Image (cartoon, grey):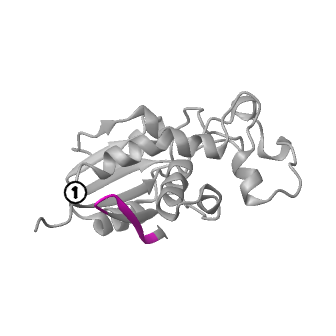
């Protein structure tokens, strides 16, 4: 009997983005990597790994450089944050009030010229499945949206993926065994 194929996926949200109070999904803004205690705690919590994948966003590249300066990560453009279209760069205070929406309706809502969270989940699914196929311990440094998309993949519900808060420099762990996803921990922080 063949042993099960298991991958531990460790998803890290980048360090706090320097957004000047504006929405930054696809805007390529820098990260504040000055919380050395949080970086050291996260580095220790992760330990060793076999593969390191990252979003090409500057804030993700800076986070990886602060965590593992000698690492050679593989950039995967599929790991970019949700595209908020016409809302990119808009001050948070000036974003439209969508009113009371169910989580399912919010997941389906698409900003003008952008993508919905449901579309983000569809876009991310192949990248997440590819990462799970690498086996062993795989670290992904990306954004809150892709981490929520992984939670949607694990729970089988796009709407449930939106129910999770994902803090900067947090660690969310999954175990994938023969294609079956389970959530080991969510939003672990190390300040």
Q: Is residue 61 above or below residue 129?
A: above
Residue 76: x and y in percent read 38, 35
Residue 142: x and y in percent read 45, 47
Q: In the rendered structure, which segment of residues is drawn in magenta?
A: 177-185
- Nearer to us in this view, 179 or 74: 179
Secondary structure, mark 1, is loop
Image quadrant where residue 20 sits: top right
Q: Give the left or right position of residue 73, taking residue 166 as reference.
A: left
Q: Which residue is found at the position 75% from the left and 36% from the top? A: 111
Residue sitting at the far front = 1
Q: Which residue is found at the position 24% from the left and 64% from the top? A: 47
Residue 117: x and y in percent read 64, 46
Q: Which residue is found at the position 40% from the left and 56% from the top? A: 11
Q: Residues within 10 Å of mark 1 (few under 14, many from 20)?
A: few
- Nearer to us in this view, 168 or 110: 110
Secondary structure mostly seen in the magenta stretch: strand
């Amino acid at each position: 009997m063949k042993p099960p194929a298991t991958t531990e996926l460790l998803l890290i949200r980048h360090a706090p983005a320097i957004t000047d109070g504006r929405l930054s999904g696809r805007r390529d803004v820098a990260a504040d990597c000055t919380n050395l205690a949080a970086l050291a705690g996260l580095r220790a919590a992760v330990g060793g790994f076999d593969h390191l994948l990252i979003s090409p966003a500057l804030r993700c590249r800076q986070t990886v450089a602060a965590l593992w300066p000698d690492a050679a990560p593989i950039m995967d453009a599929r790991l970019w944050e949700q595209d908020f279209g016409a809302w990119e760069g808009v001050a948070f205070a000036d974003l439209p009030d969508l009113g009371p929406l169910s989580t399912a309706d919010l997941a389906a809502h698409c900003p003008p010229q952008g993508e919905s969270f449901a579309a983000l989940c569809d876009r991310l699914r192949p990248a997440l499945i590819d990462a799970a196929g690498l086996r062993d311990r795989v670290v992904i440094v990306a954004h809150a949206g892709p981490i929520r998309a992984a939670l949607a993949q694990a729970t089988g519900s796009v709407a449930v993926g939106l129910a999770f808060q994902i803090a900067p420099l947090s660690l969310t762990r999954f175990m994938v065994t023969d294609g079956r996803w389970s959530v080991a921990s969510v939003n672990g922080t190390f300040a």
